[in-house]
Image (tube, coloured by chain):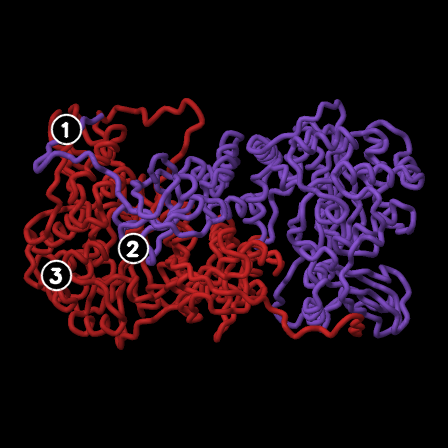
Chain colours: A red, B purple
Amino acid sequence: MIVVENVIKDNSISKERKMQLKVKILNIDSGGKPVVFLNDKDADELNITASERVIVQAKKKITAIINISQTIEKGFLGATEEIRKLLALKQNSKVSVDIAPFPKSLQFIRNKLSGKKLLYPEIREIVQDLVDGNLSENEISAFVTALHIDKIDLDEATSLSRSMIDTGKTLNINKKIIVDKHSVGGVPGDKTTLLVVPIIASEGFTIPKTSSRAITSVAGTADRAEVLMPVEFTTNKMVQILNKSNGCIVWGGAIELAPADDLFVKAEFSLHIDPLLLPSIMSKKKAGGATHLIVDIPTGRGAKMKTTGEGDLLARDIIELGRRLGIHTHCILTFGEQPIGNSIGPALEAKEALEVLMNQKNVPDLINKACSIAGSMFELLGKKDGFGLAKKILESGKAEQKMRQIIKAQGGDALIKPEDILIGKHLMSVSAKKSGQVLWMENRIIVEIGRAAGAPKDKGAGIVFNKKLGERVEKGELLFTIYAEKSHKLDRVKYILSSRSPIGIGKRSDMLIHKITESPVVDRTFVIDR
Amino acid sequence: MIVVENVIKDNSISKERKMQLKVKILNIDSGGKPVVFLNDKDADELNITASERVIVQAKKKITAIINISQTIEKGFLGATEEIRKLLALKQNSKVSVDIAPFPKSLQFIRNKLSGKKLLYPEIREIVQDLVDGNLSENEISAFVTALHIDKIDLDEATSLSRSMIDTGKTLNINKKIIVDKHSVGGVPGDKTTLLVVPIIASEGFTIPKTSSRAITSVAGTADRAEVLMPVEFTTNKMVQILNKSNGCIVWGGAIELAPADDLFVKAEFSLHIDPLLLPSIMSKKKAGGATHLIVDIPTGRGAKMKTTGEGDLLARDIIELGRRLGIHTHCILTFGEQPIGNSIGPALEAKEALEVLMNQKNVPDLINKACSIAGSMFELLGKKDGFGLAKKILESGKAEQKMRQIIKAQGGDALIKPEDILIGKHLMSVSAKKSGQVLWMENRIIVEIGRAAGAPKDKGAGIVFNKKLGERVEKGELLFTIYAEKSHKLDRVKYILSSRSPIGIGKRSDMLIHKITESPVVDRTFVIDR
């Protein structure tokens, strides 16, 4: 509508628009994000504020997030390791800096903050910018918070799943049927996968299981498996392993099936929210090529899902999301109010799983859970009495045989014996102060103790329980033993046990749960491992 | 219920629990927050994840937020300037590090994320931890996002106001009546305060006006006032000024009435949300001791409040919050669809205000708005025909006289003339391409141009409009002129003007606003200045 007529009264407009700065190498990294430090006066001159972006140009050009700093001299640009590498910068070399527009994805995040449902291209853009490091901590956090409060619906979950697949690697396994299992987690001691994978694989099905390491828990399946064999492989190597053994148990982090997820987890972690649960699970399964999937939903007090109602609703969404992504999915709700089996901690759990595979030990709840999952998969694939079939495979020693084949294919010792597994040498035993029945076990405190003892980092740290729910206990009887690799870590365990207990002994008629006398500081269980 | 019996099988538990690290001075600051950098292996050993906290102990003990880094060697703790100063650390000195519990306030934030209304002691704890630097960027962002999505209610707004007052300084002025004004902002060129303060003060009322600098706008009132006089003072000095002149116009940032607000703004800024608007305004007014307050709510397309309905609801909340804090508050809705007066930019606006105060220039909308605000205050204080009284004070020269008294009290040149004010020497003029009427002015683009020209940093940069809404324009007639201190900044202005216009010329019968042919990338006006 208007025409610009440049009436330059004074002098001609200079060609140079950008600010020229000298590089100061900071020798610190910024966690993968392209971050630069600018003096506050230079930032003022550019008219920018913290968490805005600048375009930094040396031989190449990149967009970086600003940190405003008083320790960087005026005229200098503080370069983190990420920036130094990306632009091949040297101390005192020159760069030009210019204000950059906000990324388009930020407007989509803002739309979400005002309650708008996001469409696929918008979510795709957000996830791409997330993976590329173009979003600040602040912005990622706001997005995750909005997804949590507004609840992501199934359309958004589908878009997020697809975007997370698009921005990661995929496994290409040349099989018509690829099966997988997943647990939404939250129960300590859940070494079920170490039984399920060999049971299913020994029936000839391909199961490319990727697992996570512990974030908030005592052990992730990758931590447990690593006690028996290497777990870090490339996608190519993983396909080779599967060709040998039909099954594998590898660390998903190395495979990079959905790298966006780790970045979301980082934001969710301290907030104790996980709106990305559904897309996180399903994107990785789809990227792994799964056609058939069983999802285990541990349910009950102290588990991620507190009630069966809640669990059923989650199952509904998982199954529908599976349908949209082309994965035939069934879910099972399992009892999650106490640890699975008796042992907790990477090495102790690997040992217990191996003993059960070798039929050396009877751990009823662990065996029941493993056969329920493997059996459900068999039934999803059209077989009758899946549970019975799974149990038979386990009892026959075929599962052990398959597991040793997998261990070998992944480069472990195929002849490993339970007693070869190293357990922490420092022990602390806890006995009952009174007689009664085990009325409750508190997963949260169990996790706290296991981590204080050194797990998951110290693989030999953990807990072995001698009593579980409903069992009779006599005064002075052994309840549990804590193992640590480093003696000083037991000090912290002792401190925790001085005020809290992971296990409650009493009479069935004891009715009081606890008293509230003033506004309580609620401290809920939170499990982000997925 | 249980007793801990320590059956130490191996060796006695060592007393040493904490990790010992050597200090590496990083020579960078982290924006006021206590941040330390840890090698990923040391973090693993401590079982901590990014954005958790550690207790760092040297001679003193503090809690710091963790950055996990691969550039820090194992065995070292990277210390930012904040940490170095707080603990008086030296290169290679030794500190002990231990995992710290999450701050209690973080659980309150989590409660907010699950939809709980927060109580005063909880909000107080959050604001305290915010001010003390104990909350991570991630957590502050989640809190602000939750307040935005869930809407803070008046109880929470009251608690936030009180907490922000508690954690800042307060002004102690020994007067029974203390008056104040505030504008929620959003309209460019709003130099009204420069008229309102002297009008009110010349009637003998005390008006301790604190103002902000521009964040997203072309000029904040503090930026405008600074063209005429110094604006940075301590609270003590501010009281001395008020004793001399009854009124003042100082920068609120230096006074630190509600330091929490700046930290909230930092989180809100790139997200384009401002749920803290109400507590932000009212806490500063209360901390300043206000007993009577007029709040101006510019309303209309391109202003912060788009409709009168929205504006009225905001007014309702402001008045009620005022009642709860003991401030007698009235609000006025004002027309906000175009700039106030003809000039935009700190120096140009200060000049225009001075010319009006000196009755050298008639700027009808500016005078009308100033007299509406001052008049409303006079009526709130019990006077009749406030508007008429305000106008009389302005026309009589009493307001100019009072303004010169204020300028002198704040250390400026009391004899300053409009022509003494330095305006940018580089000009670009824009003329109409066709004849018609001014149908719209777009505040957002006006702001963008003003900032591109260098404002608020370059005080002499800005825009002067020759035409405003409804005025008749002939083809080739001058519409506006852009002023810059640095010629290269006009390049960016030219770039903006090549695709967008701040002013629309057409016929009253032109009906089309704009066309949408595919999913639009919405880019709303956002104003955080408050």
| Three-letter code, disc 3 | Ala
Secondary structure, mark 1, is: strand
Q: Is residue B498 left or right of residue B55?
A: right
Label drawn at residue B5: 1
- Marks 2 and 3 sit apart, C-alpha to C-alpha, by 44 Å
3 and 1 marks on the same chain: no
- Label 2: chain letter: B
Closer to the camera in the image, B309 or A393: B309
As shown in the figure, which amino acid type bears the numbered disc 1?
Glu
- Residue A355, relative to residue A494: is it above or below? below
Local packing at callout 2 (Cα closer than 10 Å; few below 14, some 14-19, many 20+) is some
Do marks 2 and 1 share a subunit? yes
Which kind of residue does numbered mark 2 sit on? Glu
* Vertical relation: B267 (above or below) B57: below
Residue B281 location in percent, x, y?
66, 39
Q: Would residue B10 appear left or right of A315 to someone viewing this image?
A: left
Question: Few, some or many C-alpha atoms within 10 Å of disc 1 (few <14, some 14-19, many ≥20)?
Answer: some
Q: What residue does disc 3 label?
A: A399
Could you say which is closer to the camera, residue B52 or residue A178? B52
Tag 2 residue? B73
Residue B364: x and y, percent? Answer: 89, 50
Name which residue lies at 23% across and 57% down.
A222
Nearest the viewer among B415 and B452 is: B415
Cα distance between the residues tagged 2 and 1: 39 Å
How crowded pointer 3 is (Cα within 10 Å; few <14, some 14-19, many 20+) is rated as many
* Vertical order, A9 against A71 (above or below): below
* Residue A102 appears in the figure: yes
